[in-house]
Image (cartoon, rainbow, N blue to C red):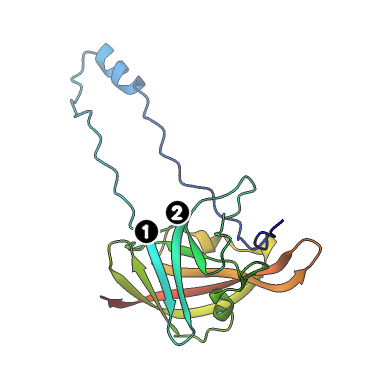
């Protein structure tokens, strides 16, 4: 039987964004009972903005050129990463490739028993100011510069990695630390955080 990709590499993701609850009609009913005028508004909802998914990420001078696909979470709340470590997952509830705020989260396995080492093995020692380019589904390219490369125990991955607020940034995540052959998992997550550099094409 073929051995699947190494497990336990995925970071634990923040809870998906859920639509806001429908407002109650209690206030309108009360106003009507008092004989007050009730403002009339169109019942048609504005169409939701379609996200612009990232489809490719490249790291200059590091032989990292990876296809990106949208991913969600499993029942444990961990990102469901593509088994092939040469493909990264975009956390679909994080910021998209055209975002002005929040974090765009891309993650990939560091290796696999089937495919061997993946390109993200080379992000674990990126220097500050290294250049990362993300290509969007619409063809737009966005350039980032590395601010930091950090390592966290999986259980201690900070919530800010998935923060949807604040200045826009890009986060790349892969595995690091000690490998446990019994569980086929790594002990840590490597987190690269980068800021927009203003490049586009």
Picture residue at 32% right of the left edge, 62% below the top: 98
Quadrant of the image for the C terminus? Answer: bottom left
Compared across the picture, whether 140 is left or right of 91 comes to left
Compared across the picture, whether 198 is left or right of 59 comes to left
Circle 2 residues within 10 Å: few <14, some 14–19, many ≥20 = many
Considering the numbered disc 2 on the image, is that residue within a helix, a strand or a loop? loop
Residue 92's disc is 2
Which residue is most to the front?
1
- For marks 1 and 2, the one nearer the N-term is 1
Quadrant of the image for the N terminus? Answer: bottom right
Near-viewer residue (162 or 93): 93
- Check if mark 1's residue and mark 2's residue have beta carbons within 8 Å: yes
Which residue is most to the right?
182
Q: CA distance from mark 1 to mark 2?
A: 8 Å
Picture residue at 19% right of the left edge, 29% below the top: 41
Residue 14's disc is none
Residue 56 lies, in percent from the top left, at 40, 68
Say above or below: 126 vs 183: below
Residue 55 lies, in percent from the top left, at 39, 64
Considering the numbered disc 1 on the image, is that residue within a helix, a strand or a loop? loop
Compared across the picture, whether 61 is left or right of 1 comes to left
Residue 164 lies, in percent from the top left, at 44, 57
Q: Which residue is mark 1?
A: 53
Say above or below: 106 vs 120: above
């Amino acid at each position: 039987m073929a051995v699947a990709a190494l497990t336990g590499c995925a970071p634990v993701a923040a809870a998906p964004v859920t639509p806001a609850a429908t407002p109650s009609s209690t206030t309108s009913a009360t106003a009507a009972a008092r004989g007050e005028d009730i403002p009339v508004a169109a019942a048609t909802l504005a169409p939701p903005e379609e996200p612009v998914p990232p489809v490719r990420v490249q790291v200059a001078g590091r032989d990292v050129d990876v296809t990106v696909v949208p991913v969600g979470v499993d029942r444990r709340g961990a990102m469901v990463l593509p088994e092939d470590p040469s493909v990264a997952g975009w956390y679909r509830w994080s910021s998209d490739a055209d975002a002005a705020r929040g974090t765009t989260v891309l993650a990939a396995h560091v290796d696999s028993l089937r495919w061997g080492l993946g390109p993200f093995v080379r992000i674990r020692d990126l220097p500050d100011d290294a250049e990362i380019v993300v290509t969007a589904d619409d063809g737009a390219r966005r350039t980032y510069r590395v601010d930091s490369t950090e390592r966290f125990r999986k259980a201690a991955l900070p919530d800010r990695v998935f923060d949807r607020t604040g200045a826009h940034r890009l986060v790349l995540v892969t595995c690091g630390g000690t490998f446990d052959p019994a569980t086929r998992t790594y002990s840590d997550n490597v987190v690269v955080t980068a800021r927009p550099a203003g490049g586009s094409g």
